[in-house]
Image (cartoon, helix red, strand yellow):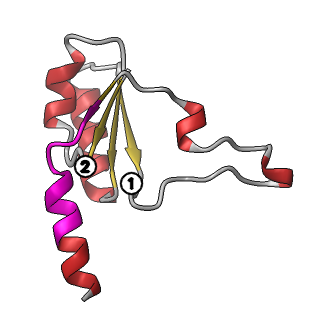
């Protein structure tokens, strides 16, 4: 299991998918994730899961007594993290805040 954090259109997720069982391709940009999904479908790639996720605010446990929905970390254990654009995203997030 590989998590590609800040995956954008999933280019690297698709490259990695040739060598692993499953890739979760995460990005906060809805348009990029839509393009990611489209390219996966066009290329018949079934082991890449495009997911809209703001890694600075991942989904927490939720609902009744915090038992109905597990947190991102509880739902999936990763073997490898790919964070090729992480510094870029954090840098520009901090600029937007200041």
**Residue at 21% in and 42% down:** 83
Q: Which residue is mark 1?
A: 55
Instruction: Answer above or below: position of 43 versus 49.
Output: above
Question: Is 49 situated left or right of 97 in this image?
Answer: right
Instruction: Answer above or below: position of 65 versus 1.
Output: below
**Residue at 72% in and 53% down:** 62
Q: Is residue 34 magenta?
A: no
Outermost residue toward the bottom?
98
Q: Which mark is residue 97?
A: none
Outermost residue toward the right?
65
Secondary structure beneath dot 2 equals loop
Q: Which residues are magenta?
A: 81-91
Q: x, y (%) of residue 91?
A: 17, 68
Q: Quadrant of residue 18?
A: top left
**Residue at 19% in and 81% down:** 95
Q: Residues within 10 Å of mark 2 (few under 14, many from 20)?
A: many
Q: Residues within 10 Å of mark 1 (few under 14, many from 20)?
A: some
Instruction: Answer above or below: position of 65 versus 36.
Output: below
Q: Which mark is residue 6?
A: 2
Question: Is 62 situated left or right of 47 in this image?
Answer: right
Do the residues bearing badges 2 and 1 touch, measured as CB atoms within 8 Å? yes
Q: x, y (%) of residue 44?
A: 27, 19
Q: x, y (%) of residue 72?
A: 54, 42
């Amino acid at each position: 299991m590989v998590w590609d954090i800040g995956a954008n259109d999933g280019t690297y997720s698709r490259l990695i998918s040739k060598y692993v069982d499953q890739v979760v391709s995460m990005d906060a940009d809805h348009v990029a994730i839509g393009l990611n999904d489209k390219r996966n479908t066009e290329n018949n790639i079934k082991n890449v899961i495009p997911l809209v996720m703001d890694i600075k605010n991942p989904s927490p446990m939720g609902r009744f007594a915090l038992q109905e929905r597990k947190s991102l970390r509880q739902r999936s254990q990763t073997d490898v993290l790919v964070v090729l654009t992480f510094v870029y995203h954090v840098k520009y997030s901090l600029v937007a805040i200041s």
